[in-house]
Amino acid sequence: MPQITAPRGTRDLLPEEAVAFSHVESVSRDLARRYAFERIEIPLFERVELFARGLGESSDAVEKEMFRVGGARGSDEERAEWALRPEPTAGIVRAFIEHGMHVRPGPLRLTTTGPMFRYDRPQAGRYRQFSQWDVEVLGDPGPAVDAELIELAHRFYAEVGLSGVVAHVNSIGDAACRPPYREALVDHFRPHVERLGEDARRRLEVNPLRVLDDKALDPDLAASAPRSVDHLCEPCREHFAAVLALLDAVGARYEVDHRLVRGLDYYTRTAFEFVIAGREGQQQALGGGGRYDGLVEVLGGRPTAGIGFGIGLDRTVLAMDEQGVTVPPAGPLVAVVGFGDDHADRLRVAATLRDAGLAVRPDGTSRKLGKQLESAAKAGAGWAVIIGEELARGEVGLKDLATGGQRTIGVDEVATAVRG
Ligand code: AMP
């Protein structure tokens, strides 16, 4: 029988790889706490309609990458209805509207972490299932919060140990100034349509801003293209200037990137993306986000300002690997070993050590002591607690598996001793 393997574009996170992942998740959780975000969870799948309206029909996520699903007995009709979430913003905004969250004291600061799905062609750093840490702020028109989120993302990359991360920022205007900018782009590209690739030609018709997003765009055509910052209406211009001034004030590293328009249709004003300096253009963004002041209304709620970002955890871990970032070791691992069938004692001592906060692996066999110690060392334990007759006095043997040194100490002294 042929071996069953993981679906294309997915990957198993084996224990040794999961260490870095867990570290990155714990950094994000701690930052979410320090930046006063509240957790929200939304389903992994939603109506296709939500993403079509929320992300825009012309976004890659909807046009090319939607991961459709049906029920076990799903009819074709049902399959047409549901999709695995390609990103969490649309679902969070749906929940915000559905639960009348606008009446809560705002602005709301929400965070979620979990898998996203895009049925794209898999390649390095591009999976069909990947994890994102996401934050969203609803009800805050900025500009301070725009800078705060960019600073937060920077702090995340710094705290996981990455260096050289730069924020690319741009403003893509709003409902007042975007239409004339779109016109200006169409006027610029249309006479050169033969120099555009197939993707860019299609984008020129449905969403001309996204021609700028085309990685294969002729560099001369890109360089001479009208820039959105030159077409902003006065309120958008002031907003963007304030965001940049605040980024300067907090010392966040950024570059204005006139080609950054982001793939999703619902963005307004501030758009940003994080890359490792010098690795731009490799479709390797570590994260990105932006303002979406029109989205709540588009999905049927009252007009509410919104801004958020999604950080790709897989790519963050890949970048850490590339930069040789080492993850701080977890606390010491202690094995509990003994003689014969003293398993009740081993479990009792293990429980006491766990009460003291240690990570403990009791040996469940009745093998010779030497064998138990050998497998403890192989499992990565730094210490072995050896149970013998002295347990009657509340004492055990404590063996340093690296040096081989051994002494007898009280069970209640073990935690302090192994923590050094
Ligand atoms: P986006 O909403 O496309 O800007 O995605 C936000 C972040 O999620 C990106 O900057 C990536 O770090 C990550 N990401 C997006 N798509 C994928 C994918 N197919 N595989 C892995 N990571 C992804």
Image (tube, helix red, strand yellow):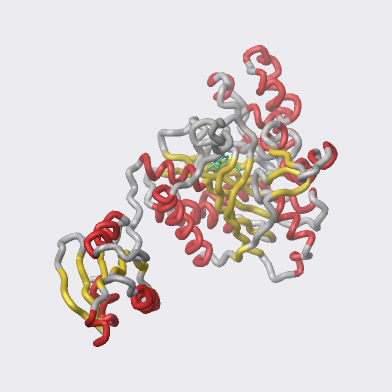
Q: Quadrant of residue 381?
A: bottom left
User: In which quadrant of the rendered view does residue 7 lie?
Assistant: top right
Pick the front one: 317 or 157: 317
> Whole-percent x and y of residue 58?
73, 33
78 above or below 63? below
Report the front residue among 297 and 74: 74
Q: Is residue 167 placed above or below 357 in the rendered structure? A: above
Q: Is residue 390 above or below residue 49?
A: below
Image quadrant for the C terminus? bottom left
Q: Residue furthest top?
A: 194
Instruction: Answer whether residue 32 is visible to the viewer in this image.
Output: yes
| 14 to 283, vertically: above or below | below
Residue 414 x/y as whole percent: 27, 76
| 124 relative to 394 in the view: left or right | right
Residue 21 position in % (x across, y down)? 45, 51
Residue name at image x 68 percent, y 49 percent: 292
Question: Residue 353 location in percent, x, y?
Answer: 35, 76
The answer to which of 191 and 96 lies nearer the viewer is: 96
Q: Is residue 167 left or right of residue 191?
A: left
Q: Is residue 418 left or right of residue 181?
A: left
The residue shown at (77%, 41%) is 52
Instruction: Name the residue: 78% across, 56% down.
Output: 303
Q: Is residue 187 left or right of residue 168?
A: right
Instruction: Give the mark count.
Output: 0
Quarter of the figure that contains the N terminus: top right
Q: Quadrant of ligand 1?
A: top right
